[in-house]
Amino acid sequence: MSENTVAVTRNTAGVGREGDGPIPGFGFNPPAAPVTGFEILALAALRHRMPDTVLERVHRVDFHTLTLITEGSGEHTVDFVTHPCRPGTLLWVRPGQVQRFGPAGTMNGTHLLFTPAFPPRFTGAERLLTAWHGPVCRQLEAGREYATLSTLLAQLTAEYTRPAGTVSREILQFLMATVLLQIDRLPHPAGTDPGAGGGETYTRFTAELERSYATTRRAEDYAHRLGYTVKTLTRACLAATGQSVKQLIDARVALEAQRLLAHTDDPVAVIAHRLGFSEPTNFGKFFTRLTDTTPGDFRREHRDGAPPGGH
């Protein structure tokens, strides 16, 4: 994400001094790249090209980023959760998520940026690009896990940096698909594996939740649409995450509320309406119950550039 890598898109309504206004958004637009929809570079190079005042402020992207930390330590915040990073940490930030880089230090690694359309559609990798609930952060074990991904990333870098006119888009696409499929083989952190325990029922529920969280928060509605009983749906969700259907629905709505409060200038009443609340007061009570802060306080915290609270 650099001045040469992305186009910055910003809703400028109400933007004042530095740190005020909505979170900046970055769209993928690398005019100097040898292929469209993909870039790979060192994390240190990214930090050299982009001002820390941009990277260390909460922002969002409309493409995927994968980062494998290879040296040093630091932290990275995604959707208001701060993840400690060290060699072997793998970060996957998906389109629409908000993020902020920790202070510049010794941390370095390999950083991939790619659009959802870049991986080839007949490899099976495309199904991994739509899982909003997929894990953001994994810690790879020293040995096979780390070596496999490091080798693939080195191959991607070697192909991407070939002389002008000799870079193969097809090779990059297939290597990228292989990276994604290898990541899918990795053990999932607790509560992030869509197939763990809940199986197909849970997978179908998460897809429906992504479609419908702004229109209904009733577990009965999801059960009816999917052809299950609430009891069956609850059992699948508990098996997969340890949380009930209602808890998962509320958590998804609260996350979107956080994103909208931080990323847009929409009044709280407008955000409440977008998320299906008939009254702003009901939204305020809901948000405070889920996040332990009011919508106004949350917006002020993230507009002022204060570090989001870690979990």
Image (cartoon, rainbow, N blue to C red):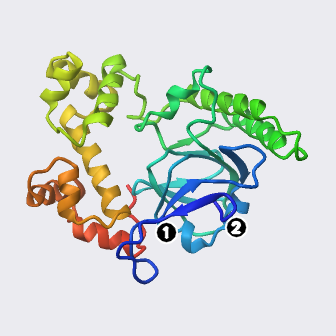
On the image, which quarter does residue 125 sit in? top right
Identify the residue shown where x is 29% and y is 29%: 208
Q: Which mark is residue 215?
A: none
- Element marked by disc 1: loop
Identify the residue at the far bottom of this view. 17
Which sits in the foreground, 208 or 294? 208
Identify the residue at the far right of this view. 163
Q: Is residue 71 visible?
A: no
Q: Residues within 10 Å of mark 2 (few under 14, many from 20)?
A: few
Q: Is residue 94 above or below residue 271?
A: above
Q: Is residue 130 above or below residue 56?
A: above
Query: Could you tell which of marks 2 and 1 lies nearer the N-terminus?
Result: 2
Identify the residue shown where x is 76% and y is 35%: 169
For the C terminus, the quadrant is bottom left
Q: Which mark is residue 49?
A: 2
User: What's the amino acid at mark 2?
Assistant: Arg
Identify the residue shown where x is 16% and y is 21%: 224
